[in-house]
């Protein structure tokens, strides 16, 4: 039966289940900031005296269907003044609202009536941070960082100080889907992990999904970090920026057609390398990025958006080593309102990650990367006050460049070579339903059907018994197998094909107005693999598609949680427990060489992984002092067993900790507003040290000392902890001028903790005894930033 017929029947059944004979009408529209006409995401539209409410989507749209009658609705959003309005609903109403940013302290905004939307929604394992909260956190070198801020949330860690990427509930950094205006970001860090690629001035909203992930998202296992850029001020021209110790930033926004269209341009650049040049230092490390967006409302039913991001990092050593890498994304979107109940978004997206390396001392010029072309068509269908549907289709075409090699100068002996490019096509159809069964039970359920074609234009090795890795029983090690032939695939041929059904389900059971219990299950498929034997992503990492050797990774995750708000909404408390298992998680044989390797299947083994734990999160929402405490206790393990009785597998086939397992992870975040002039912030972080493999002895063979090692990742680095503080000064004279400014003073690692990024072992030249050496990246780091807005 055709898909559209099945969908029609499904919609009819759900509509019938949730319809009543009573006459109903719909109120719908968009909600925006009155000052700049920017649409707002996540605004609560509450119908007082009922259990009905709506929340604006990613484009500020809301829709509520209610029985005919008179109602009082409340429009509320954090740091904005609440609107209370009486309406008479005897016909369909189109109603747009503009909210005024509150001039009072956040804690002084009074919500007259609450419905506990966070406890009632069948949404769990989801965290949202406002960009204002992100900006108030102390950060290293004064550079506000989106990725560093989410590390304070439960279940989120990273591989260590100065490391890029992040890990969610024991998943690898490559298992996170990071989207900027729906476009995929493959490397999210500047300067090898010191900063993120996201300019906080250009960010409008960010949301992290750790579990219960809706069916509209796919392609990764662990999490989704969904970030949206601002649209730009539709009313008047505006600029703001900041000057820091190593970088500065500037944003400009304004109307194209007042009230209808707007533009936004934001740029950042570092300049620490200029001081090195003044000191005759031949080394340098710098970055720059550019965010752009154009939005235009054609009429009441159509809007278009064109957004982009371009970023580059440049690292040079003595003019003999040159490293350039970065992301480029472009997204053209069309919003269309078919009716007051049916909203659609069509997106055409281009995403490119490039990595280039020049080694003049050996005459090598090497570059690699991944490109993808993405078409998405999504629908949000507000059937009635009890049922909302989201459905659509996604198509991704991938082009992988494992490596292009060229001579970098005339004296080079390097021969030009091109590792074979790889191509793949990933498609998905999905639907999600958010269904209010009763005043006590709300459900969210959906299904995603994903397909993946590994396409031709490549010559593949053929191995005996189809095993590219063989086991040497004499030395008890795995080795590369020698190909016994090759097979070539033409452009239109399929090398491998996979498809998976990915069900999603979550439920909220409301105990009372302030408490609920929630549960969720989701299955995810990941067809892309990050080829890296480090615990943190690096610019050199290469992505590879699934094929007959790189099997798609499959995840099943269940979670159960308890959620509670205090009666006055002053405090929030959440506790969640989770368990997830992963099939086909790749690990590498000892001594694996991944650089410029055109036969990666010769160094990988497929295994499985599991993660489980409990997360605690408590938050203070009101008062001069606000903040939160998060604590996670968890375990993340991997296992690769032998394929035959004589094979040892990895770590003798036993479970071993992954490189990003953190048993204990504690974060404390506090913000204190002393008065209109001064506000202060502090973070405390404590977590178990990164798992490592240490030598536990040595033996001498023909005069050579050879170390022996413990089991894989059996030991840990010392515990990691630090305190960061900040103080923000807003001069009182700001009130009497058109431009405003502020000074942000910060100290990273206040008590100068020498946290270990790595521990190496060496022989002391004087005593001839072995000793351990600790590598520390940062001690205490003061900073100052001057921000200006006009």
Image (cartoon, rainbow, N blue to C red):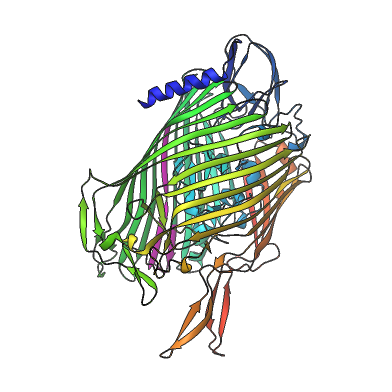
| Percent of width and height locating residue 48 | 71, 21
Magenta run includes residue 469: no
Frontmost residue, 640 versus 626? 640
- Can residue 232 be seen at all in this image of the molecule? no
Image quadrant of residue 525?
Answer: top left
Frontmost residue, 16 versus 49? 16
Magenta run includes residue 324: yes
Is most of the magenta stretch helix, strand or loop?
strand
Q: What quarter of the picture does the N terminus occupy? A: top left
| Percent of width and height locating residue 135 | 63, 46
Residue plotted at (36% across, 47% down): 371
Is 634 on the left or on the right of 287, as rendered? right
| Percent of width and height locating residue 234 | 54, 28
- Can residue 40 be seen at all in this image of the molecule? yes
Residue stretch rendered in magenta on the structure: 314-334
Q: Measured along the vertical axis of the image, is residue 93 above or below residue 624? A: above
Q: Measured along the vertical axis of the image, is residue 125 above or below residue 544? A: above
The count of marks equals 0
Frontmost residue, 456 versus 293? 456
Q: Measured along the vertical axis of the image, is residue 608 above or below residue 72? A: below
Residue plotted at (76% across, 27% down): 112
Q: What quarter of the picture does the C terminus occupy? A: top right
Image quadrant of residue 315?
Answer: bottom left
Residue plotted at (51% across, 27% down): 389
| Percent of width and height locating residue 291 | 48, 42
């Amino acid at each position: 039966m055709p898909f559209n017929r099945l969908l029609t029947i499904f919609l009819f059944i759900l509509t019938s289940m949730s319809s009543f004979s009573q006459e109903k009408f719909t109120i719908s529209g968009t909600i925006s900031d009155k000052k700049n006409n920017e649409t707002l995401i996540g605004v609560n539209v509450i119908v007082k005296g009922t259990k009905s409410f709506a929340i604006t989507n990613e484009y500020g749209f809301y829709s509520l269907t209610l029985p005919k009658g008179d109602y009082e609705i409340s429009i509320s959003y954090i740091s904005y003044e609440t609107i209370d309005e009486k309406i008479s609903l005897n016909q369909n109403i189109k109603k747009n609202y503009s909210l005024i940013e509150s001039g009072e302290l956040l804690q002084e905004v009074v919500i007259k009536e609450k419905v506990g939307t966070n406890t009632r929604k069948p949404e769990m394992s989801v965290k949202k941070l406002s960009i204002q909260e992100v900006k108030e956190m102390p950060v290293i070198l004064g550079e506000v960082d989106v990725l560093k801020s989410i590390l304070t949330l439960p279940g989120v860690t990273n591989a260590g100080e100065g490391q890029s990427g992040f890990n969610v509930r024991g998943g690898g950094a490559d298992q996170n889907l990071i989207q900027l205006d729906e476009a995929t970001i493959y490397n999210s860090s500047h300067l090898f992990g010191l900063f993120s690629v996201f300019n906080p001035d250009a960010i409008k909203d960010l949301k992290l999904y750790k579990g219960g992930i809706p069916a509209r998202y796919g392609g990764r296992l662990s999490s989704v970090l969904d970030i949206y850029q601002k649209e730009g001020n539709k009313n008047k021209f505006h600029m703001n920026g900041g000057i820091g110790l190593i970088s500065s930033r500037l944003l400009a926004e304004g109307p194209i057609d007042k009230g209808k269209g707007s533009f936004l341009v934001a740029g950042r650049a570092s300049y620490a390398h200029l001081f090195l040049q003044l000191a005759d230092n031949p080394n340098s490390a710098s970055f720059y990025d550019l965010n752009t967006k154009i939005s235009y409302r054609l009429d009441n039913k159509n809007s278009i958006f064109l957004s982009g991001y371009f970023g580059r990092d440049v690292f040079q050593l003595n003019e003999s080593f040159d490293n350039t890498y970065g992301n480029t994304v472009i997204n053209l979107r069309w919003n269309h309102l078919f009716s007051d109940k049916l909203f659609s978004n069509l997106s055409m997206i281009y995403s490119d990650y490039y990595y280039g390396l020049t080694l003049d001392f050996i005459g090598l010029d090497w570059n690699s990367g991944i490109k993808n072309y993405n078409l998405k068509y999504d629908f949000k269908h507000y059937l009635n006050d009890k049922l909302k549907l989201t459905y659509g289709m996604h198509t991704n075409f991938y082009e992988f460049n494992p490596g292009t090699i060229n001579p970098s100068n005339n004296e080079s002996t390097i021969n030009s070579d091109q590792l074979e490019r790889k191509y793949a096509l990933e498609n998905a159809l999905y639907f999600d339903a958010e269904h209010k069964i009763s005043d006590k039970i709300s459900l969210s359920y959906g299904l995603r059907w994903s397909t993946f074609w590994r396409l031709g234009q490549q010559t593949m090795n053929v191995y005996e018994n189809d095993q590219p890795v063989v086991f040497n029983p004499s030395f008890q090690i795995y080795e590369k197998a020698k190909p016994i032939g090759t097979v070539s695939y033409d452009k239109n041929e399929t090398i491998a094909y996979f498809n998976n059904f990915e069900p999603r389900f979550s439920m909220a059971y409301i105990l009372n107005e302030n408490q609920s219990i929630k549960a969720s299950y989701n299955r995810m498929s990941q067809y892309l693999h990050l080829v890296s034997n480090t615990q943190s992503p690096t610019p050199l990492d290469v992505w590879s598609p699934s094929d007959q050797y790189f099997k798609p990774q499959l995840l099943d995750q269940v979670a159960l949680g308890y959620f509670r708000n205090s009666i006055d909404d002053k405090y929030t408390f959440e506790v969640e427990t989770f368990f997830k298992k992963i099939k086909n998680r790749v690990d590498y044989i000892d001594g694996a060489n991944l650089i410029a390797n055109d036969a990666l299947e010769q160094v990988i083994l497929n295994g499985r992984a599991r993660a489980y734990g409990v997360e605690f999160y408590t938050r203070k929402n009101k008062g001069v002092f606000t903040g939160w405490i998060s604590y996670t206790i968890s375990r993340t393990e991997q296992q690769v067993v032998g394929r035959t009785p004589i094979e040892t597998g990895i770590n003798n086939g036993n479970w071993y900790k992954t490189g990003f397992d953190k048993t204990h992870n504690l974060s404390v975040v506090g913000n204190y507003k002393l008065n209109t002039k001064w506000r202060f912030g502090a973070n405390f972080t404590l977590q178990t040290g990164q798992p490592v493999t240490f030598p536990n002895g040595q033996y001498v063979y023909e005069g050579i000392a050879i170390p022996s090692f413990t089991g894989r990742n059996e030991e840990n680095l010392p515990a990691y902890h630090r305190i960061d503080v900040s103080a923000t000064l807003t001069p009182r004279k700001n009130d009497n001028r058109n431009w405003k400014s502020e000074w942000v003073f910060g100290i990273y690692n206040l008590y100068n903790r020498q946290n270990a990024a790595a521990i190496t072992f060496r022989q002391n030249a004087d005593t001839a005894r072995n000793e351990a050496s600790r590598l520390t990246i940062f001690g205490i780091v003061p900073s100052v930033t001057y921000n200006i807005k006009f």
